[in-house]
Image (cartoon, helix red, strand yellow):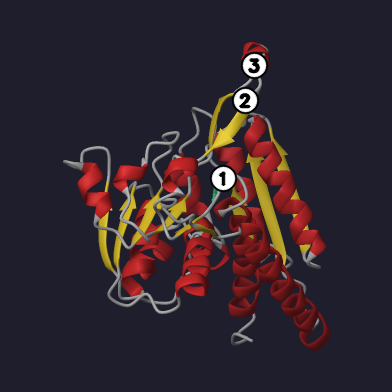
Amino acid sequence: MPQAQIIDGRVFAEHLRGVVAAEVADLRAKHGLQPGLAVVLVGADAASEIYVRSKGEHSVAVGMHSLTHKLAADTPQAELLALIAALNADPLIHGILVQLPLPKGLDERAVLAAIDPEKDVDGLHVVNAGRLASGLPALTPCTPLGCMIMLRETLGDLTGKRAVVVGRSVLVGRPIAQLLLQADCTVTIAHSRTQDLPAVCREADILVAAVGRPQMIRADWVKPGAAVIDVGINRVPSRDPEKAAAGKTRVVGDVAFKEVSQVAGWITPVPGGVGLMTVACLLKNTVTAARRINGLTAA
Ligand code: GUN
């Protein structure tokens, strides 16, 4: 079997960050407008801390105003809501992201609902989810947006393709299904209760794995030549037994990369695939929000 072509997230993300940096420079020069992104982290989840640091560093690198608020895990809901209200009212901030998951005791839905939909660069407010589902312009969740950019650039026109999304999360599965539908794909959303999941996956020209189960998608689940997009970021014990015993981990996707890359036509690696595009799309969404808030049309 031929080896699948790698869809390199590093290349796509670098290109998109360059585009965003040019847009930020243009907004600053022509309109005196510096897009601003506020990221809120509650608690000290190790993976979340890494993601939040990366979001702050990348926003500064493209010339944006960047704010990071770190709150204790036992922060009362009212205090978090008060911070969001202050960020909603802050004219220097155009994008607000509350890193998920939130510590137990905080109501995720209520927190997301408190963010001004115009500043909801995560696209998780029900107004943006509803606009997306209705085919209206919306701030769109970053990981699905990144997947779509890579798919379009790699495959070109997606019209009529069979797309199967495995996973129905609000963060990835549902919004990417909507975006694939908007691109005129025939879309199936599969999940843990789907009967004969391998057979459903084998129908896909585009297979998006977003289940959070390490290496669940096997080679015999994949149609030869399909494009496989792996959204999974799963920590598993290190291959080296000594390191594993010492608690060392490695990151794998939802796709069994080695064997699937013998069957697929295109595949995103983990790490080095979708994850890198997520932050780049967050920057893009922040520019989009800054433009809309200031009544400017897209560049
Ligand atoms: N945690 C993991 N991915 C995401 C994301 O895209 N947005 C937020 N807010 N939290 C996350």
Q: Residues within 10 Å of mark 2 (few under 14, many from 20)?
A: some
Query: Mark 1 vs mark 2: which is more N-terminal?
Result: 2
Viewer-nearest residue: 23 or 229? 229
Q: Amino acid at mark 1?
A: Val
Residue 212 position by quadrant: top left
Residue labelled with disc 2: 249
Q: CA distance from mark 3 to mark 2?
A: 6 Å
Residue at which label 3 appears = 247
Taking the image as shown, residue 250 lies to the left or right of residue 68, namely left
The residue that appears at 60% across and 53% down in the rendered structure is: 97
Q: Is residue 98 left or right of residue 59?
A: left
User: On the image, numbered disc 1 is attached to which residue?
Assistant: 270
Q: Residues under labels 1 and 2: Cα distance?
A: 14 Å
Residue farthest toward the left in the current orientation of the protein:
195
Q: Is residue 236 above or below residue 135?
A: above
Q: Name the foreground residue: 262 vs 96.
A: 262
Give the residue type at disc 2.
Thr
Q: Report the amino acid beneath label 3.
A: Gly
**Front-most of 21 and 136?**
21
